[in-house]
């Protein structure tokens, strides 16, 4: 197996908390994400709230603002990128059982509403983090970090 990690992108759709955006940058840096796409009303740097949790990662992690998530996904798919949505839906495959194909873009969604139905329809695969407690979901940045770690396990 090659030691070079294939491209992994992060698509953040309509993330409302600037602190979550910062945390996504920090996790993206740690797990070697090639680029973050900040979609819809997701805020972009520079913002002090993003910097507070990103701890500087927003200065070197590549990112791009895209208003229309569906247009971005269609462009990525046309270039051979597999789209994987992280969502708690019952039909989602448990993340530990998912066998990723690269290049890949991980999609995370709004803290309350999740990923929009239109984007879920465009995804090649939908995955979820198995939950053992009473809560039905995790904070979006924490969930994204877990998923990025899982996607990169084979490269450590």
Image (cartoon, rainbow, N blue to C red):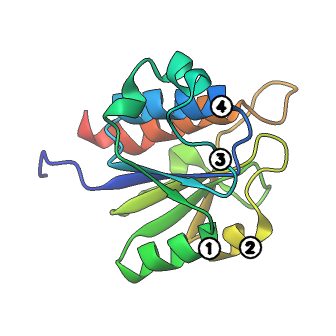
Front label number (3 vs 1): 3
Quadrant assignment for the C terminus? top left
- Residue at image point 84% right, 36% down: 136
Residue at disc 3, secondary structure: loop
- Residue at image point 75% right, 47% down: 110
The numbered mark, 4 or 1, whose residue comes first in the sequence reads: 4
Which residue has dot 2 on it? Answer: 118
Q: Is residue 143 above or below residue 70?
A: above
Q: Report, in whole angstroms, how far the alpha carbon at label 4 lies from the one at label 1.
A: 22 Å
Q: Of residues 84 and 90, which is closer to you in this image?
A: 84
Which residue has dot 4 on it? Answer: 18
Which residue has dot 1 on it? Answer: 70
The answer to the question of whether label 2 and label 1 lie on touching residues, with beta carbons closer than 8 A, is yes
Q: Of residues 102 and 130, which is closer to you in this image?
A: 102
The answer to the question of whether label 3 and label 2 lie on touching residues, with beta carbons closer than 8 A, is no
Residue at disc 1, secondary structure: helix
The answer to the question of whether label 3 and label 1 lie on touching residues, with beta carbons closer than 8 A, is no
Q: Is residue 8 above or below residue 156?
A: below
Q: Report, in whole angstroms, how far the alpha carbon at label 3 lies from the one at label 4.
A: 8 Å
Front label number (3 vs 2): 3
The numbered mark, 3 or 1, whose residue comes first in the sequence reads: 3
The numbered mark, 4 or 2, whose residue comes first in the sequence reads: 4
Which residue has dot 3 on it? Answer: 42
Q: Residues within 10 Å of mark 2 (few under 14, many from 20)?
A: few
The numbered mark, 3 or 4, whose residue comes first in the sequence reads: 4
In the image: residue 99, left or right of residue 11: left
């Amino acid at each position: 197996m090659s030691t070079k990690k294939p491209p992994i992108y992060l698509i953040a759709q309509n993330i409302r908390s600037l602190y979550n955006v910062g945390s996504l940058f920090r996790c993206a840096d740690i797990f070697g994400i090639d680029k973050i796409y900040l979609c819809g009303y997701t805020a972009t740097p520079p913002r002090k709230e993003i910097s507070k949790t990103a701890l500087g990662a927003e200065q070197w992690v590549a990112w791009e603002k895209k208003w229309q998530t569906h247009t971005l996904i269609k462009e990525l798919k046309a270039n051979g990128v597999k789209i994987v949505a992280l969502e708690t839906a019952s039909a989602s495959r448990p993340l530990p059982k998912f066998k990723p194909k690269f290049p890949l873009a991980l999609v995370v969604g709004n803290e309350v509403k999740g990923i929009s139905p239109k984007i879920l329809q465009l995804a090649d695969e939908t995955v979820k983090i198995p939950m053992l407690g009473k809560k039905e979901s995790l904070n979006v940045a924490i969930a994204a970090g877990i998923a990025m770690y899982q996607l990169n396990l084979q490269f450590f």
